[in-house]
Each structure stands twice: as structure tokens, then as C-alpha cells.
Image (tube, helix red, strand yellow):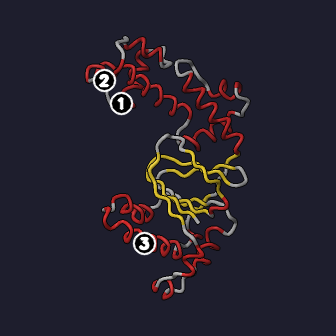
Amino acid sequence: MEINHCREGRIEFESSEGECLYVKKGDMAINMKAGVKSYSYFPQSHYHGVTIEIDFDKIEKNQNMIMKEMQLSPKILQDKFCNHKQCIVLHEKQEFEHLFSEIYCVPEQIKKSYYKIKVMEILLFLFALDTTKEKIENRYFNKNLVAKVKEIHQYMLNHIDEKLTIACLADKHQISATNLKKYFKEIYGLSIYAYLKEKRIQKAAELLRETNHEIGKIAGMVGYDNASKFSNSFKSIMGINPSEYKKSV
């Protein structure tokens, strides 16, 4: 069994049946290794998290006093979360942050012993968790549509200077606008327009730092034909307007 906690970013898992599932910041995912392919994909090109792999056979042979005292069997955990060999996602919960936060900053000299104690704490938490009161989600997404949306994402980045609409993108890549919006937000965590705005402003900031182009020209290079709208968008992302940013760098 594998337990994943996402602290930052986003991670994609592909099931053995070829469907995709996403784990976002604060989420915990639980799955049987046999039910998920070994590769992972990071849509935001950034991920910080913890993976715990559990061998039920070894645990069964080496149950410690606490587990025996509480009559907790690994089989209970397996049946509770992995009965159908699928990956389930438990959404952001304050207890998850408490459980995992210390793992990210353990002194090197005590890591091995600390991890043993912490894993036991996590297992006990999962044993006690009332799944009937938790929002457990198995939202799987079609692999072929995921691949198509990733192509659209790359197309957007390659044509950041152009006016891009959802209708045109959907038509060009032969996908419904509804699926495009739904899949894009699940994969990248933002709506298409919010994501495109963020990437355009990031590119504009890079050009302001690294070139001597006029602000108006840079606005056009990232898809803005209105200087005022560009300035407002830039300030909403960067906190200052383009001219102030250019002076600061």
C-alpha cells in the first residue's frame, strides 16, 4: 500500500486501467501499488510531498505491542481503504497537516527512529478514521482526454502572444468546451483564463528583467493589445505595475 501527502503543488496518478486522478495541496491519497502505475506527473512542474510505502506481509510478521494491544490488523486497513485496488483521495483536513508537518523537518540523526514512530501514528489515525464522515473522492479522468488537454496546454504556452479563447482551443483540438474547462482545472488547478493570465504576466516580468523592450511592446508580446488592461493584470499578479517593476530590477 502507498500513502501520499501533498504539501505543495499537484500530482497526477494513472490507474492500472488507464485513468488519471489528481492530488492537490493538503490532500492525502491511499492506494494499493498494484492499482496504480509507477510513474507520476507533476502538472505545475513543482511538487513537495511525502510517500509512505507499506508492506502488509512484513507488518503482519512484525506487529508491535501497540498494534497488538489495540487489536489492529493490517488487513483491516487494507479492506478499509484499498478493497477495490483503486486510489482514494482524502481532501485537505487540519489533522493531515498535523500528522505530516513534522516529517518535513526532522533532524538527520533521528530520522530513522522518528519515521518509524510517525508511520505508526499515521496508521493508527487511519485505523480510527470514520470514513463515513469524510469526503472521500475517486474522481478518475479519461487518459485520452487528459493527453489532449496537455497538448492544448502546451499550445497555449507556445502561442502566448495570441488571442486565445476556450471556443477556439476546443474547436482546434476537437474537444468539447465543457470537458476542456473541467479537465484543465483539474490538471492545472486554475481555470484556463486565470492560468493563461498568470503565465502571460510571468513571461512579461521575465522580458522586463532581461530585455530593454518598451512596456507597450512587451504587452503585445504576451497577448495584450490594451496597455491599461496589461498594467492592471500585471499589478494583480506581481503587486506593482510594470513600470515600477522595471525600475526595481
| Left-right relation of 229 to 166 | left
On the image, the x and y values in percent for residue 8 come to: 44, 49
Q: Residue at x 50, y 56 (%)?
A: 27
Disc 2/disc 1 C-alpha distance (Å): 8 Å
Q: Quadrant of residue 235?
A: top left
Quarter the C terminus occupies: top left
Q: Earlier in the sequence, mark 3 or mark 1?
A: 3
Crowd tier of the residue under label 2, counting other residues whose Cα lies within 10 Å: few below 14, some 14–19, many 20 or above: some
Q: Residues within 10 Å of mark 3 (few under 14, many from 20)?
A: few
- The amino acid sitting under disc 3 is Lys
Name the disc covering residue 245, or none.
Answer: 2
The answer for how far apart the CA atoms under marks 3 and 1 are is: 43 Å
Q: Which residue is mark 3?
A: 116
Image vertical order of residue 212 relative to residue 43, above or below:
above
SS label for mark 2: helix
User: Where 31 sits versus 226, above or below?
Assistant: below
> Nearer the N terminus, badge 2 or badge 1?
1
What type is the residue that disc 1 sits on?
A: Met
Mark 2 and mark 1 in contact? Answer it, CB < 8 Å. Answer: yes
The image shows residue 152 at horizontal and vertical percentages of 63, 30
Q: Which one is nearer the viewer's eye here, 57 or 169?
A: 57
Label 1 belongs to which residue? 238
Indicate which disc, 2 or 3, sits on the residue closer to the N terminus: 3
| Nearer to us in this view, 35 or 239 | 35
Q: Nearer the viewer, residue 149 or 243?
A: 149
